[in-house]
Amino acid sequence: MSEMYAKEVPAYSTLMHLVYEVNEETLQANPELQNQLEETESLARISEERHGAIRVGTAAELAMLRRVFAIMGMYPVGYYDLSIAGVPVHATAFRPTSEASLKRNPFRVFTSLLRLDLITDEALRDEAAAILAKRQIFTDGAIQLTEKAERDGGLSHEDATTFISEVLETFRWHDQAKVSAALYRRLHDAHRLIADVVSFKGPHINHLTPRTLDIDLVQQRMPLHAISPKAVVEGPPTRKCPILLRQTSFKALEEAVSFQSEDGAWQIGSHTARFGEIEQRGIALTPKGRALYDTLLNNSREVMRPAADGSNATEYMKCLEEAFQTFPDSWDAIREQGLGYFSYSLTEKGKASVGFGGTSLEQWISEGLVRFDPIVYEDFLPVSAAGIFQSNLGDEASQVAVASANQVQFERDLGASVLDQFEHYAEIERASIEACKGVICAQQVAAE
Ligand code: OOG
Ligand code: NI
């Protein structure tokens, strides 16, 4: 998919090079970060893609995607309601969930389902639904191999290779629209996103996102490479101890597409959907930490919202930094106040010690037997995602009703419930503590 996207969107290659360059520089200037990453994650893949996104049109498409991703070990985690920001979709992220799989490849796909119920023009809504009901976004091969994998509990190496190339077809760009220029225009006028989902043969991958170790530096350098970044970096401000997720993107490109008129002739037009994005990840927050994050973000947005044209970008970032002054910025404080999730492991001293006295985790930490490292946040943030959507959609008026979250309907359409992200991080933390306890208690028993 990465190769396909780089061929389809050349600006994406430029961004990948820039990210690679900045990551190399950051690691060289920061041996401590390099050591920590070497110990806790694999450095070899640091600059590779961490996520991508697609938008689908029907419950059947979403449910089939769930089955396809499950074969690749990716499961729906989290529910994101974007309707609060006037974007007529709700979403989940398909991703690996076990610690071992995440270490090997944490790639996720942010997957949005269009909410046709939010189109206020009834005739247009019916027309869009009829078009979506007729399309098939999966190849026959992808469907057959999905059924086979479900039946047999997996695929042979050969079938797996075919499966990947068949599934890739679903994510491919199609420059010939399935609708006429006139209908595209009507869909577009209702909401740009509706035109994007309904007009084409499939849900083209709309961005892929590499991980950067210094998002501010990449943001600053984008214009030097003729890439125009969105006005502000989404998420928390720059910090010593990164929390959650920071993201920025370059704006969606205007690309040539063609529409077929009734007499069968093709008519040239354009469509904007695909963009480039980068992310920098920090620690996963507990419900308490997340509540603090949400409050501080809201506080800063009450003072000032980032303007789409970037005119208040500097003031907005300053205001955000001020609001976040009260969020502790040391790993010790974040841990002591129960704001973030950590993974605990034995130090060299801990592994070598036999029969020491302490009985609690806190004692083992203060004796230097156990260390703690932040667990990386693997999910998304609804306000940030809305900011990314909006920077690509512009501020034009749309005919979309303001709605509220509807997780029940989303899960019905998905055919499964989404996993709770907090439970998942808590479990990784708990298992790491149990593993330390197991070894230390065995050492103590052996010493007695
Ligand atoms: C998805 C936008 C959200 C993110 O990283 O938050 C997203 C889309 O535009 O389809 O990718
Ligand atoms: Ni994204």
Image (cartoon, rainbow, N blue to C red):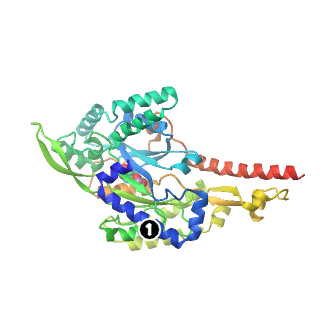
Q: Whole-percent x and y of residue 378? A: 52, 52
Q: Is residue 270 left or right of residue 57?
A: left
Helix, strand or loop for disc 1? helix
Q: Is residue 91 left or right of residue 311?
A: right
Q: Whole-percent x and y of residue 443? A: 82, 52
Quadrant of the image occupied by residue 231: bottom left
Q: Whole-percent x and y of residue 76? A: 49, 42
**Which is nearer the eye, 51 or 304?**
51
Q: Whole-percent x and y of residue 35? A: 60, 65
Q: Is residue 110 left or right of residue 323?
A: left
**Which is nearer the eye, 130 or 172?**
172
Q: How many marks?
A: 1
* Residue at 48%, 39% in the rendered image: 72
* Residue at 75%, 64% in the rendered image: 368
Q: Is residue 40 left or right of residue 362?
A: left
Instruction: Respond yes or no on whether mark 1 lies under 8 Å from ligand 2.
Output: no
Up-down relation of residue 14 to residue 58 (above or below): below
Label 1 crowd (10 A; few <14 / some 14-19 / many >=20): some
Up-down relation of residue 127 to residue 10 (above or below): above
* Residue at 54%, 71% in the rendered image: 30
In the image as oriented, which residue stretches furthest toward the front? 158
Q: Is residue 303 visible?
A: no
In the image as oriented, which residue stretches furthest toward the top? 151
- Which amino acid type is shown beneath numbered disc 1? Val
Up-down relation of residue 280 to residue 325 (above or below): above
**Which is nearer the eye, 116 or 358?**
358
For ligand 2, which image quadrant applies?
A: bottom left
**Which is nearer the eye, 331 or 35?**
35
In the image as oriented, which residue stretches furthest toward the right? 448
* Residue bearing mark 1: 22
